[in-house]
Amino acid sequence: MTRIETPSLHPYQSLSPDAVIDAVESVGLLTDMRQYPLNSYENRVYQVGIEEETPIIVKFYRPNRWSKSAILEEHQFLAELAEEDLPVVAPLEFNGQTLFEYKEFYFSISPRKSGHSPEIANCDQLEYLGRWLARMHQVGRDYNFQHRPIWNGQAALGKSQDKTIIEQSCETVLNSGLLNEDFRPAYESLCRDLNELVKQQYQPAMSDTLRIHGDCHVGNLLWRDEQLYVVDFDDCVQGPAMQDIWMLLSGEREEQLQQLEAIRKGYEVFQPFPYHQLKWIECLRTIRLIKHTAWVVERWSDPAFPLAFPWFTGVRYWSEHVLSLREQLSALQEEPLYIPN
């Protein structure tokens, strides 16, 4: 069973403001003592002022989530993308290193970038994003991750490998005590049916996978002065290109088809579009929908989560979540999204 954090195990209790400053100064930087917490749930991220220089961003990785080797793979991927002039925010090097330790925390330091989310309804921006994704995926094919999960529908590294992500996530929710009991039978039944359909429809081969961002939603895209920056590679995995593409889609079916066409147009400037993966979109959407709820459950003892999701234990949330699962069950039984090759 997935370990859910308890208050006594809350990993950030010792990360005080003084600890943040001490960690930054341990790499040789001189701070002006100013710090500002940024929006991040899984990790802790701060803007820290540096004497007579531009502020930096320091990221403290959640203890026991990723191994040192897995974090360094993320950093290596970012370095490769930066070398190809792709607009990512790679961690800074100090004395030839990008990953540091302070007490029980791994942390990294990055330059500060700002901006706003792009307009997904804007076809020009979607075409631009398509070109960017194609270039990122070109780099992602150079070699495979060795210490990060393969996004093939099975449970992630460190969890039960004989269960699917959906089974593992459903079990986490059912055992949490946070699921409204009125919705337990429907939730359990829907997860079971969705799991069977996803297992039938989503069967990627290793040759279908490459190093991808993994969580490429608009919240991780910054647009400023005609420049795009892609941030937060914390969930980068070995997975299908379509995982990065479908998360840019929104709206009704016709709107999504228009968005896909714009992305495809940009993508094919640099490499062939993965048409054969279009049939996986609803499977990938289903996995994310169920996994996201389990993620909130697993982190519920972290004070940041009840503050960020105050509605999570209410009837309305679980009613809407079950409705979303029913809609996904219907979507998996319909014809997949299709654009002509």
Image (cartoon, rainbow, N blue to C red):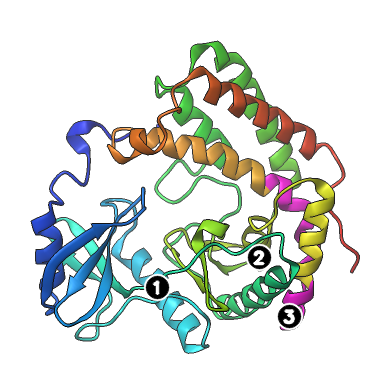
Q: Magenta-highlighted stretch: main secondary structure? A: helix
CA separation, marks 3 and 2?
A: 12 Å
Percent position of residue 266, x then y: 74, 76
Q: Which residue is mark 1?
A: 113
| Residue toward you, 154 or 115 | 115
CA separation, marks 1 and 3?
A: 29 Å
User: Mark 1 falls on what kind of element?
Assistant: loop
The image quadrant where one finds the C terminus is bottom right
Look at the picture and state if 263 lies above or below 197. Answer: below
Q: On the picture, is 269 further left or further right than 299?
A: right
How would you rate the neighbour count of disc 2 (Cα within 10 Å): few for under 14, some for 14-19, many for 20 or more? many
User: Mark 3 falls on what kind of element?
Assistant: loop
Q: Of all residues shown, which one is farthest toward the right?
A: 340
Q: On the picture, is 339 further left or further right than 29?
A: right
Percent position of residue 168, x then y: 50, 35
Q: Quadrant of residue 310?
A: top left
Is there any visible trace of residue 163 in the rendered image?
A: no
Percent position of residue 206, x then y: 63, 64
How would you rate the neighbour count of disc 3 (Cα within 10 Å): few for under 14, some for 14-19, many for 20 or more? some
- Start and end of the magenta stretch? 265-283
Q: Which residue is mark 2?
A: 241
User: Which residue type carries mark 1?
Assistant: Lys
Q: Which residue is mark 3?
A: 271
Look at the picture and state if 233 lies above or below 90. Answer: above
Q: On the picture, is 59 further left or further right than 329?
A: left
Percent position of residue 62, x then y: 29, 52
Look at the picture and state if 298 lies above or below 48. Answer: above
Q: On the picture, is 54 further left or further right than 260?
A: left
